[in-house]
Amino acid sequence: MNRNIHIGLPIGTASILLIFLTLSLTSFAVLSLETSVADMNLTSKSADYTQNYYAAFHEAQGFLADMDSKLSSFYYESADYNDYMRKAGFGPVSDNFPIGEMQYLHVEISIIYPSVSDINNHKKSFASSGEDTFRSSAFYKISSFRIITRDDLLNYKDAEIPVY
């Protein structure tokens, strides 16, 4: 009565486990690939936005440099405050620099009539900084330097969002 009871797995069990393992690893590989493609697309969009922002920032710096040059020449050509303000204009001066189709950099300056000491102090502070940094001028004050998003181009679909 020596019977050996042998409990084993059916013959196809190893094949089924191998197929399941292969499918699992393949699905994880595909998910990993999709994640890396999505990350690459997001990085590309971020790099494009950053490049566009700094291009707009550079154009804004050029605008400020041009205004500084114009206001400086108006100052040295004018006889008094009224003559200077008549040449320069009394109101604020602004310009927009596109970043993308939905955003732009808005720059607005207020024209001021500087004193001689203001001009000299400004020249000294610029010379002592030793680097080309973002700065105001003795002839104007920056009243606005900000990114504006055009809300009229955004399509909000509030009706489709379930709010409880």
Image (cartoon, rainbow, N blue to C red):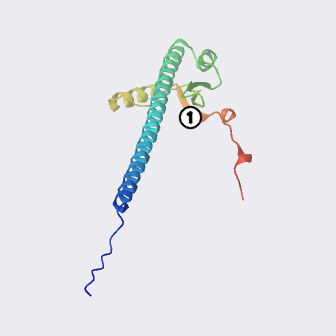
Q: Quadrant of residue 3?
A: bottom left
Q: Residue furthest top?
A: 77
Is any atom of residue 135 visible in this view?
no
Q: Nearer the viewer, residue 12 or 76?
A: 12
For residue 23, above or below residue 83:
below
Is any atom of residue 7 visible in this view?
yes
Percent from the top left, x then y, of residue 61? 47, 25
Query: What residue is shown at x 60% (from left), y 31% (from top)?
Result: 102
Q: Residue furthest bottom?
A: 1
Which quarter of the rendered picture does the N terminus lie within? bottom left
Query: What residue is shown at x 41% (from left), y 51% (from top)?
Result: 23
Q: Nearer the viewer, residue 60 or 49?
A: 49
Percent from the top left, x then y, of residue 16? 39, 58
For residue 45, above or below residue 113:
below
Label 1 secondary element? strand
| Local crowd size for mark 1, using a 10 Å CA cut-off: few (<14), some (14–19), many (≥20) | some
Q: How many marks?
A: 1
Q: Residue furthest front?
A: 1
Percent from the top left, x then y, of residue 24? 40, 54
Q: Residue furthest left?
A: 2
Query: What residue is shown at x 49% (from left), y 30% (from top)?
Result: 53
For residue 127, above or below residue 163:
above
Percent from the top left, x then y, of residue 29? 39, 47
Which quarter of the rendered picture does the C terminus lie within? bottom right
Left or right of residue 16: residue 114? right
Q: Nearer the viewer, residue 66 or 118?
A: 66
Q: Amino acid at mark 1?
A: Ile
Left or right of residue 34: residue 127? left
Left or right of residue 128: residue 80? right
According to the picture, the residue beneath numbered tag 1 turns out to be: 147
Q: Nearer the viewer, residue 25 or 4?
A: 4
